[in-house]
């Protein structure tokens, strides 16, 4: 490995719809070597697959990125900043071609490459013929048993296709479905000359990439300590300084709002992980080896991280239409909210039961006793129906609209919101496994040169990727003290992994760690969260982060794009748990 100075990689997007001005802000901020933008969450892929299927001529890529980037191409060329993004979606070659036209129109000489090999939808028959079952990651069921026709299948690729393109002189690299962290791993591997067998260094880059992949998540966005974040109204975007050994420093543009602390970095570190073994196509990261240190204002150091070979299988995101859905939001006002919601459910059922496949009526929140305003007395009610065929849902708007004069007293909707009239497609998600060796991962340069991504000398054994088993603490709830909201002492961050929800909870004060780990046993979590009582839980501890991590299997159904929860991808589960009251010894209470 080289002794080259750290590479500075700045993020400008964490999802499709992130702040439009981010590229402009990043170019006006502190110097960086590479800017990376992540656009492809699982829910985003589901939506993009639907729109691409309906309007193929509009392209299967994220046009939003083109509009963001186009005005800044001259500045990018002048400064020599590299751009890496997965905004290519289902058509990275098409986006690369569109970018080359923009570059030519601007009279510039930037080289644009793309990475291909993730899009597997046209190879599914080939895989079936070869006996590859593409088993579901959660259920082990073969893909052929799904019973629906996939419209998209994309493998999560690693970073070496990006690295090859950069090494060949690309200024802008467009990918499809690489892992979010690969957008950092690829530039770091190119910069430092890593090989696919440099697992420790790669694991460190995956860790840094995981932290900055979601943009302002690392600088105070979606942070349970948001009240202490300066400039929280407009937090800036993060930067990772990745060294030759994979260690890194997470920071941000000095002029921008937000902050980078051990807590804001921990929040992202425990987000959307499987456990202490974080499986990526370039390395298996041993997250329990991660040590964080505050080394300056808005500077958090991550020491060298332990890595091992990547898994032998690649994860593939498969999507298929499973019907249609339609929903609306209604409101009721106290008193007798429960009875009003029950009447609404009964009246809608008289019309829709047996017509639609599923009807869900969910009241959100409770009315305040002795309310000071009408809105303190008001409870929203989300009503949603699903069906295999669009025509089954035609009765839904009329069924809802017929209740204004015959429903519960005070029945109303938001008169300023457009009423739902037409159903929209419902897309399901299948997280499949496929032998990594069948993938064709390569970079394509602007002159047509094809560069195969190198592969590691070996892949992981089952033991190397198996999540460790942590014994449940004993001792039970502490005696004495008093009951306070969990959030008075603990932070939390929650997210989605397909149909599973993950939540990490941690404490800033080392004196609180033993209390947290003995309070948050699996039984302790079930006591706090009745929704988890019948779910399989996986629990792990991260002593160096003072964090307890849970995976709640099946809380999100089969995935965010198809379950009927209002909190579709589990983003609020952590805050929900922080609002619950727990017993705290008096010596821990300030």
Image: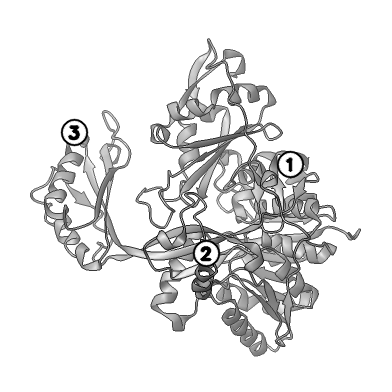
Q: Quadrant of the N terminus?
A: bottom right
Q: Is residue 475 left or right of residue 339?
A: right
Does any portion of residue 424 appear in the rendered image? yes
**Which comes sooner in the sequence, label 3 or label 1?**
1
- What's the CA distance linking mark 3 and mark 2? 41 Å
Return the x and y of residue 314 as percentages of the image width and height. 61, 60
Horizontal side of 278 relative to 326 (left or right) equals right
- Residue 16 is marked as 2
Residue 495 locus on image (x, y percent): 52, 47
Query: Residue at 20% across / 68% down in the picture?
Result: 391
Count of numbered circles in the view: 3
Secondary structure type for disc 1: loop
**Residue 430 location (% of width, % of height):** 46, 58
Residue position for label 3 = 336
Disc 1 crowd, CA 10 A, few/some/many (<14, 14-19, 20+): many
Decide if residue 584 is on the left or right side of residue 407: right
Residue at the disc numbered 1: 290
Residue at image point 48% right, 29% down: 525
Q: Is residue 170 above or below residue 524?
A: below
- Rendering quarter of residue 444: bottom right
Give the secondary structure at mark 2: loop
Of residue 417 and residue 328, the one placed in the foreground of this image is 328
Residue at image coords 63%, 56%: 213
Image quarter of residue 468: top right
Element type where label 3 sits in the image:
loop
- Asked whether 531 or 266 is in front, the reply is 531
Q: Along the line of sight, which residue is nearer the eye, 59 or 388?
A: 388
């Amino acid at each position: 490995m080289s002794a080259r100075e750290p590479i500075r990689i700045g993020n400008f997007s964490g999802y499709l719809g992130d702040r439009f001005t981010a590229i402009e802000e990043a170019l006006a901020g502190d110097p960086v070597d590479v800017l990376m933008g992540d656009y492809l969450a699982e829910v985003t892929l589901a939506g993009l697959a639907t729109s691409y299927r309906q309007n193929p001529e509009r392209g299967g890529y994220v046009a939003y990125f083109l509009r963001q980037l186009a005005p800044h191409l001259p500045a990018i060329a002048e400064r020599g900043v590299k751009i890496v993004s997965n905004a290519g979606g289902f058509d990275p070659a098409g986006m690369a071609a569109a970018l080359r036209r923009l570059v030519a129109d601007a009279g510039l000489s930037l080289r644009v490459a793309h990475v291909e090999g993730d899009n597997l939808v046209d190879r599914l028959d080939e895989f079936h013929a070869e006996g590859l079952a593409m088993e579901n990651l959660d259920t082990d069921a073969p893909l052929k048993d799904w019973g629906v026709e996939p419209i998209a299948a994309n493998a999560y690729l690693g970073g070496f296709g990006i690295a090859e393109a950069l090494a060949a002189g690309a200024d802008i690299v467009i990918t499809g479905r690489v892992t979010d962290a690969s957008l950092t791993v690829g530039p770091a591997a190119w910069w430092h000359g890593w090989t696919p067998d440099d697992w420790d260094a790669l694991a460190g880059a995956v860790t840094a990439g995981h932290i900055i992949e979601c943009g302002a998540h690392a600088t105070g966005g979606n942070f349970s300590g948001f009240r202490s974040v300066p400039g929280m109204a407009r937090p800036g975007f993060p930067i990772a300084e990745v060294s030759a050994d994979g260690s890194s420093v997470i920071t941000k543009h000095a002029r921008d709002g937000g902050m980078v602390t051990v807590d804001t970095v921990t929040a992202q570190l425990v987000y959307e992980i499987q456990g202490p073994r974080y499986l990526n196509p370039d390395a298996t990261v041993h997250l329990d080896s991660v040590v964080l240190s505050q080394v300056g204002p808005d500077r958090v150091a991550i020491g060298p991280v332990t890595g091992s070979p990547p898994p032998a299988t690649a994860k593939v995101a498969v999507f298929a239409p499973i019907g249609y859905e339609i929903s609306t939001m209604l409101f009721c006002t106290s008193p007798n909210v429960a009875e009003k919601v029950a009447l609404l459910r009964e009246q809608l059922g008289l019309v829709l039961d047996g017509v639609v496949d599923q009807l869900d009526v969910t009241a959100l929140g409770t009315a305040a006793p002795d309310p000071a305003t009408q809105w303190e007395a008001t409870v929203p009610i989300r009503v949603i129906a699903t069906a295999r065929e669009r025509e089954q849902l035609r009765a839904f708007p009329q069924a809802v609209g017929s209740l204004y004069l015959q429903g519960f007293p005070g029945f109303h909707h938001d008169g300023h919101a457009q009423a739902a009239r037409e159903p929209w497609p419902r897309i399901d998600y299948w997280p499949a496994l496929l032998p990594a060796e069948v993938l064709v991962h390569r970079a394509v340069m602007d002159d047509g040169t094809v560069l195969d991504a190198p592969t590691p000398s070996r892949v992981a054994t089952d033991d190397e990727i198996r999540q460790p088993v942590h014994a449940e603490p004993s001792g039970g709830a502490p005696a004495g003290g008093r009951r306070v909201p969990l959030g008075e002492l603990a932070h939390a961050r929650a997210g989605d992994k397909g149909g599973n929800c993950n939540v990490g909870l941690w404490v800033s004060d080392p004196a609180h760690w033993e209390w947290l780990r003995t309070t948050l046993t699996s039984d302790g979590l079930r006591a706090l969260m009745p929704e988890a009582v019948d779910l399989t839980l996986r629990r792990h501890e991260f002593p160096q982060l003072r964090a307890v991590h849970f995976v709640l299997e099946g809380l999100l159904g089969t995935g965010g794009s198809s379950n009927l929860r209002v909190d579709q991808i589990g983003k609020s589960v952590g805050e929900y748990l922080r609002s619950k009251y727990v017993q705290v010894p008096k010596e821990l209470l300030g």
